[in-house]
Each structure stands twice: as structure tokens, then as C-alpha cells.
Image (cartoon, rainbow, N blue to C red):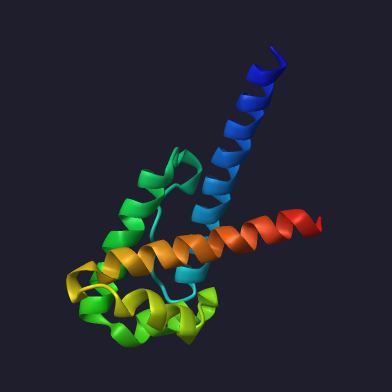
Amino acid sequence: MEELISNNHNLELHHNVIVETAIQINKDFAVFNEAVYPDPGIIQNEIELREPLFKTVAHLLKSDKRKMMQIIYRVDISENTLGKQLSAVSANDASEELSMIIIKREMQKILIRRNIK
């Protein structure tokens, strides 16, 4: 029974981190008048977190690379990380890889804040 309660607690924490990550991504993109998630509170899993971001990143890489670079700077992704991760992928996969880098960095910031509190 304790294991079941523990698993439910872990699932709830995981879901909360996903929602907080979506909210943080929205905040960072909103500075540049870009909306990623219409309602971040309803996101249930990593796929729902990734898909809208992927579409937004792909659009920005095609239409406004300068804005995308400003967002990357705002999210606080180092050039070193960006270079390492993107050098190994094709141009077609860059949007997907960049989306994952953004999600990982935003989640990292959420978890660091939680550990500091």
C-alpha cells in the first residue's frame, strides 16, 4: 500500500514538473510575443509538452532565426551545449533536438528552484 501511495505521489510530482515547465516555456517565449501552449495546465505528459514546442521552434527557425536565437539566450542555453547537440543532427532534425534542449533546460531550472526552497 505504501508503494502505491509513493508511486501516486511521484506521478503527481512528475505531472507538476511538466506543467511548471510548460508555464516557464510560455513565459520565456511570451517575451518575444510567441505563444506555445494555450493552456499549460492541461498538459498531461512529455508528448503534449514536446509537440507544440516543436511546431513553434520549427516555425521560428524557418521564419525568424534571430528571434529564435534570442529565445535560446533567454532560456539560458549555452553555445557549447547548443553546438554539441545540434552538430550531430541533420537540419531537418534540428527543430526537434532544439525543442528537447529547451525542455531539458527549463525542467532543470524548475528542479533547481524546488531544491532551493
Please tell me in which quadrant of the rendered image residue 14 appears.
top right
Q: From what the image shows, is residue 65 above or below residue 58?
A: below
Please tell me in which quadrant of the rendered image residue 84 appears.
bottom left
- Image position of 100 (left or right of 3): left
Q: Residue 30's x, y, as percent?
A: 47, 69
Q: Residue 89's x, y, as percent?
A: 26, 72
- Image position of 80 (left or right of 12): left
Spot the residue most to the right: 117
Across the whole image, how many numbered discs are drawn on residues?
0
Q: From the image, which quarter does the N terminus lie in? A: top right
Residue at the image position 55 percent from the left and 77 percent from the top: 76
Residue at the image position 58 percent from the left and 47 percent from the top: 17
Q: From the image, which quarter does the C terminus lie in? A: bottom right
- Image position of 111 (left or right of 43): right
Q: Residue 21's x, y, as percent?
A: 53, 55
- Image position of 82 (left or right of 105): left
In front of the other: 74 or 26:
74
Residue at the image position 42 percent from the left and 46 percent from the top: 46
Q: From what the image shows, is residue 10 above or below residue 48?
A: above
In front of the other: 76 or 2:
2
